[in-house]
Amino acid sequence: MFGKDESNNLQKSTNQAPEPTYHGPVYSPAVDIFESEDRISLLADMPGVKPKDLKIDLRDNTLTLSGHVESAAPSSEASILTEFESGTYFRQFTLSEVIDQLKIDAKLSDGVLRLELPKLERAKPRQITVKAS
């Protein structure tokens, strides 16, 4: 969830992204973010990225996703039409204090990166039982 109108548990970074040093175009992957009582789930669309070409970095509460994708065209064949380019996916998010950064889990399947960001125990809603005295 991003911005001032939505949850503050995960925010889109307002800082300017660092100048890319990647060859080719840089894409911003589309994301869907869902929140439950105990976690935030982030889905990032990164078609063509292989696990070995995916980097997830977390430092100073900034979560950075980057992945490189190569064209699938065989180098031994002449191109007739090329719409799929090599390039790099890049996106950054600022994490709030409610995320348990040591328990973040990532899975890449069919071009979709799924990050599970569990909340700290103190951040989870709970019922408090009232005892009679």
Image (cartoon, rainbow, N blue to C red):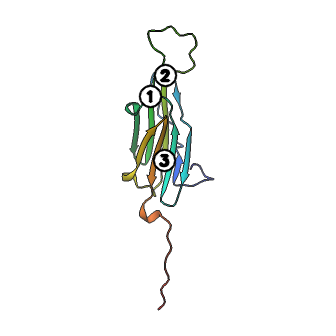
Mark 1, residue position: 68
Secondary structure, mark 3, is strand
Q: Earlier in the sequence, mark 3 or mark 2?
A: 2
**Residue at point 46%, 34% (across, down):** 18
Query: How far apart are labels 1 and 3 at the CA level?
Result: 22 Å
Q: Is residue 22 visible?
A: yes
Mark 2, residue position: 86
Query: How far apart are labels 3 and 2 at the CA level?
Result: 27 Å
Q: Is residue 118 left or right of residue 27?
A: left
Mark 3, residue position: 94
Q: Is residue 48 above or below residue 39?
A: above
Q: Is residue 15 visible?
A: no
Query: How far apart are labels 1 and 2 at the CA level?
Result: 8 Å
Q: Amino acid at mark 2?
A: Ser
Viewer-side label of 1, 3: 1
Q: Is residue 88 above or below residue 79?
A: below
